[in-house]
Image (cartoon, coloured by chain):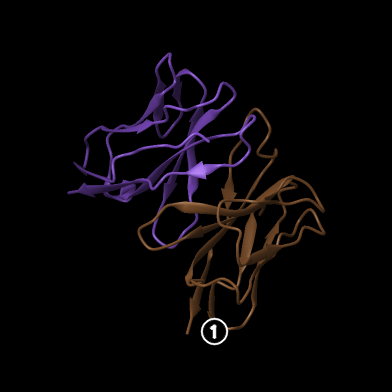
Chain colours: A brown, B purple
């Protein structure tokens, strides 16, 4: 089945550690996105990528880093510089990039829940 | 950037029609309006998308007035399984970033 796979589903981290969340898609989509969701809140955009080897900061990029070496993969690293990393992280993709006239449907993964101990 | 405003919560009963309105006063010419549904601890799921007038699919209708400064998601005959958070999303075109609002938490009661 085509879709987006995020791993791990649950992750615990000690303060000061970097962690990397995986996001893989087999939909042949050009664009990929990372969002953060806090309890009772909406989704906030961290980073997005329109094509391979290109990515742009979203509203809350500080303390995060990404790479887009392959079309299928868009991993997110939560660095020790992120002061409040405990959250639910969602990866998404779309057929066309965010600058396309038609935003197209966003396909989301099941999410990764990160807890800092 | 086109920000959106939605009611924080709504209550309904099974079998009723539910209308959720989203305000987006700064919508740009090329922006589309998209609605998503999210259940707890899951990723949002696409419901419907439109640009102007009315769009209908098998699960919902989307009404967009001529000035496009608002839109209304209509869910016919809701059931308990429609209890979720509904997000109105405005974006694409020249603005790039896809901005989600805080969503509307719909509670359907028996």
- Residue B59 in the image: above or below residue A81: above
For the residue labelled by badge 1, is the local secondary structure a helix, a strand or a loop? loop
Relative to the observer, which residue lies in front, B53 or A37?
A37
Quadrant of residue A73 within the rendered picture: bottom right
Quadrant of residue B35 within the rendered picture: top left
Residue B8: horizontal and vertical position, in percent? 29, 46
Residue A81: horizontal and vertical position, in percent? 60, 73
Tell me, yes or no, if residue A110 can be seen here: no
Relative to the observer, which residue lies in front, A9 or A78?
A78
Q: Is residue A57 left or right of residue B77?
A: right
Residue located 75% across and 47% down the image: A28
Name the residue beneath numbered marker 1.
Answer: A15
Residue B74: horizontal and vertical position, in percent? 34, 30
Neighbours of disc 1 within 10 Å: few (<14), some (14-19), many (20+):
some
Relative to the observer, which residue lies in front, A49 or B17?
A49
Please tell me how many numbered marks the rendered image carries. Answer: 1
- The N terminus of chain A sits in image quarter: bottom right
Tell me, yes or no, if residue B105 can be seen here: yes
Residue located 30% across and 32% down the image: B76
Q: Is residue B84 left or right of residue A17?
A: left
Relative to the observer, which residue lies in front, B14 or A58?
A58
- Residue A101 in the image: above or below residue B11: above
Residue B44: horizontal and vertical position, in percent? 48, 50
Q: Is residue A67 left or right of residue A107?
A: right
Residue located 59% across and 48% down the image: A107
| Chain of residue at mark 1 | A
- Residue A4 in the image: above or below residue A77: above
Extreme residue in the top direction? B66
């Amino acid at each position: 089945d085509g879709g987006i796979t995020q791993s791990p589903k649950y992750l615990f981290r000690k303060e000061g550690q970097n962690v990397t969340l995986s996001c893989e898609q087999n939909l042949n989509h050009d664009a990929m996105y990372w969002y953060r969701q806090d309890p009772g809140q909406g989704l906030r955009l961290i980073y997005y990528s329109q094509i391979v080897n290109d990515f742009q900061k979203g509203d809350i990029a500080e303390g995060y880093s990404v790479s887009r070496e392959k079309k299928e993969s868009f991993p997110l690293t939560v660095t020790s510089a992120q002061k409040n990393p405990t959250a639910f992280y969602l990866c998404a993709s779309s057929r066309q990039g965010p600058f396309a006239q038609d935003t197209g449907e966003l396909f989301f993964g099941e999410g990764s829940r990160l807890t800092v101990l | 950037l086109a920000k959106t405003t939605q009611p924080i919560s709504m209550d309904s009963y099974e079998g009723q029609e539910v209308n959720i309105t989203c305000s987006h006063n700064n919508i740009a010419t090329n922006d589309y309006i998209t609605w998503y549904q999210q259940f707890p601890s899951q990723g949002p799921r696409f419901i419907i998308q439109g640009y102007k007038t009315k769009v209908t699919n098998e699960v919902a209708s989307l009404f967009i007035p001529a000035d496009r400064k608002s839109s209304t998601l209509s869910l016919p005959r809701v059931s308990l399984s429609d209890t979720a958070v509904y997000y109105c999303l405005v974006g694409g075109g020249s603005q790039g970033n896809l901005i989600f609002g805080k969503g509307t938490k719909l509670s359907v009661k028996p």
